[in-house]
Every structure is written in structure tokens, then in C-alpha cells.
Image (cartoon, coloured by chain):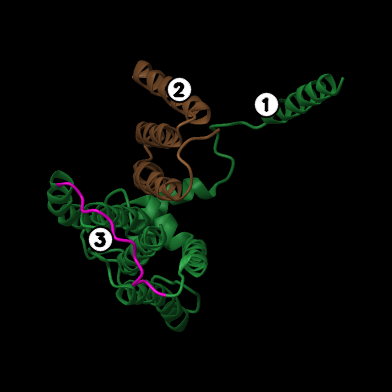
Amino acid sequence: MRRIVSLLLLIIVAFGISLSLAKIPFGVPKTKVGRHYIDEGIEETGAANIVTSVVVNYRGFDTLGEITVLFIAAIGLGAVLTSSGREKMRKTEPASLVLYTGCRLLFPLILIFGIYIFIHGHLTPGGGFQGGAIIASGFLLIYLGCRERRISRIASNLTESLGGLIFVVIGLLGLVFGGYFLLNFLPKGTTNALFSAGIIPIIYIAIGFKVGSELAGIIDNLIEES
Amino acid sequence: MIFVVSFLVVLMLVGAVAASIFRDLISAIIAAALVSLIASILFYFLQAPDVAMAEAAIGAALTAAIFIIAIRRTKRYEE
């Protein structure tokens, strides 16, 4: 009896949802703002990558919020997991020769690739978040391969705080120079050049360092405690 | 093109089902990482390389690693 009722309820709910979904015209532009970004984005922000111009320039304040969420998550994890001291680390057996050599060989390449991704965030696909995640996966490789190596927690925290600070300070400088937060006050330069798009590359480099050190710190915390 | 995409979608569904029915949790994590990897390839096909990059780095690499670290602390097999 109960099963029949719940099945009936499920069918009714699915019917209602599909009715309302059928009313939505998918694939048709419903607002004008998307068209505006595509048409005027390159001219207004100077960034060749429109996604970056939306993430850092038009919706820069949301990005600040996202970064804060990640920051709070990392802090919460650290607060839950970090116990009295890091000296009482369990002795682990060393990694095999193949893993050790492979990770030592690959780590600098992954690091350079991540840095490339976030420095060129305004020109090519990718940006601070993607580059930071790639850098963190490089650090993950180091933790797997060279188990006695550890990044210094102070350096990681310093990088993280500095990244967030640069973002906020640049936003406040926009407030000082032009009257609103995160104004692109630097010259835009020529499109497709590395030094173009004003504050976008600076902010994305700060985000890259911040996200990379945060994710690496999360992995560090987890490995430390296991 | 449509054949490649449909093959990938079928593979993704297989991975998703496998992730939910495997008793060995490490295998389940690998299946879940496969779903993320194929999702990132599909994002690339849908001309969203920015999202594809984030999905590949975070979904396939970091999430799987964090799950594996968590499983090392607990049990590997599900009753």
C-alpha cells in the first residue's frame, strides 16, 4: 500500500516537473546580458578570453565570494584535522623507484603548466582556479612519491593570505580611483598581448597562488592525519 | 561525432552505475573518477574548455585522491 502511494506520488511530481520544464525555452537567449558580454566583452575588458572577463571583471565580486568559501572550507578542515603536533607522523615505507623518479621528473613540468594556465588566464582557456588545481595535483604527486618531503605550512599559509590580500587590495584600489569596487583602473593595452586587460591577470595570478596553496594545504592536512 | 559522444555518455553511465554497486570502495572511487573524466571530455566537446580543465583537475584527480586518503583511514570493503 505504502509503495503504491509513493509510486503514485512520484509519478505526479515527475509529471508536474516535466510540465513546467516543457514551458522553458532551452537554447534560446532569455536575457540580453549574455549577448552583451559576447559582443562587447573583449572591447570593454581587453581580455581575449570572454569567460575570464566575466569571472574576474563583470562578476568579480562573486569570485571573491567563491574564494572566501574555499578559504573557509580549508580553515575548517585544518581546524578539525590538525592535532597537537606534526612530529608524531607515522613512519611510512618509501615509494617504489618508478614512482619516486616519475614524480620528481613530472613535478616541475606540472608546476610550470599550472603557472602557465593562470598567467595566460585572460588569453587562453583556464585561469586561477584551474591553474591552482593543477598545481595542487602536482603537490599531491610529491606527497605520493617523495614521502619525506613536506611543504612548509607557514609558507603555504603566507601564500594563501597574500593571494587573498592582493585581490581585496586591488578591489579597494578600484574604489579609490574610480568609485566602485574592482574597477579595472589599469590601462587595457592591446588585446591578445600578455600585458593587457588591466587588473585581470594580476587578480588571476593571486587567485592561482591562493587556490593552489589552499588545495595543497587540504591534501597536506589529510595525509598528515592518516 | 555524435557516435563518439554517445559512446562516451554510455561509458559515463556505466561508470556511474558501477560506482554505486561496487563493494570494493577503491574500485568505486576509480569508477567515479571515470565519470568526472568523461564529463570533462564532454565539456570540451561542448566548447567549454575552462570548465573541462577544472573538472579534470578537481573531479578526476583531487577528489579521487581525497576519497582514497579517507578510505585508508576507514574500511576498504563495504558490507
For the residues beneath circles 1 and 3, the answer to whether they share a chain is yes
How far apart are the alpha carbons under marks 1 and 3? 43 Å
Q: Start and end of the magenta stretch?
A: A85-96
Q: Residue furthest bottom?
A: A176
Q: Residue at x 51, y 63 (%)?
A: A73
The circle drawn on residue A147 is none
The chain assigned the colour brown in the figure is B
The amino acid marked with disc number 2 is: Val
User: Mark 2: few, some, or many residues within 10 Å (few <14, many ≥20)?
Assistant: some
The amino acid marked with disc number 1 is: Ala
Q: Secondary structure at mark 3?
A: helix
The circle drawn on residue A119 is 3
Secondary structure mostly seen in magenta is: loop
- Expressed as whole percent of the image width and height from the top left, the position of residue A125 reads 31, 48
For the residues beneath circles 3 and 2, the answer to whether they share a chain is no
Query: Which is more N-terminal, label 3 or label 1?
Result: 1
Residue A77 counted in the magenta span? no
- Disc 1 is attached to a residue of which chain? A
| Marks 1, 3: nearer the viewer | 3
Q: Which residue is mark 1?
A: A22
The amino acid marked with disc number 3 is: Ile
Q: Which residue is mark 2?
A: B14
